[in-house]
Every structure is written in C-alpha cells, then in structure tokens.
C-alpha cells in the first residue's frame, strides 16, 4: 500500500503555513507617536484591545485587535 502524500496536498499545506506566518508578522508593533513607542504602552494597549475583543473560535478577534491597535496609533 502506497501512502505517499499527493503533491497538491503538500503545496496546500505549505501555502497555509506561509500565510499563517505572514498573518502573525502583520501585528502592529510601532507607534506613530514617539512618546508612546515603548514596551509598557504597547503592552497596555494590547491588553485593552484583547479585553475589548475576546477570543472567538472563528479567528475574527485577531483582525479586530489589529484594527484596535491601529486606532491607538500602532502600525
């Protein structure tokens, strides 16, 4: 019995992995206001956005948190 994984399945898995990594790298981490561009402010803003948009099974909370951070000046 040959249990070789089809090439199209390998390509699909690779594509999903790359897209997942790119999505993680798009989380804002720099503030346009130099006075707020520090770790303490980032952590405070990230916690506020996480509390405002709790985890959802569909993953929509990630986009909402990123939008929240953008509104706070993070990009």
Image: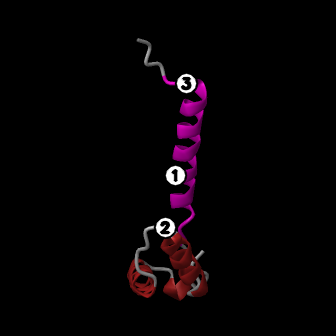
- Disc 2/disc 3 C-alpha distance (Å): 28 Å
Ranked by sequence position, the earlier of labels 3 and 1 is 3
Q: Residue 32 colored magenta?
A: no
Of residue 10 and residue 70, the one placed in the foreground of this image is: 10
Left/right placement of residue 51 relative to residue 22 reads left
Q: Which residue is mark 3?
A: 6
User: Would you say residue 22 sits in the magenta stretch?
Assistant: yes
In the image, residue 1 sits, relative to residue 61, either above or below, namely: above
Residue at image coords 47%, 19%? 4
Q: Is residue 30 above or below residue 4?
A: below
Q: Which residue is mark 1?
A: 21
Q: Position of residue 33 (x, y in %)?
A: 58, 86
Looking at the image, which residue is at 46% across and 82% down?
Answer: 53
**Residue 49, placed above or below residue 4:** below
Query: Residue 30 appears in which quarter of the rendering?
Result: bottom right
Which tag is nearer the camera, tag 1 or tag 2? 2
In this figure, which residue is indicated by the disc labeled 2? 58
């Amino acid at each position: 019995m040959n249990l070789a994984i089809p090439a199209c399945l390998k390509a699909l898995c690779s594509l999903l992995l790359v897209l997942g990594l790119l999505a993680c790298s798009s989380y804002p981490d720099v503030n346009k206001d130099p006075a707020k561009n520090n770790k303490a402010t980032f952590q405070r803003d990230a916690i506020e956005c996480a509390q405002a948009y709790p985890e959802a099974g569909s993953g929509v909370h990630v986009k909402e948190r990123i939008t929240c951070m953008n509104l706070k000046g993070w990009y």
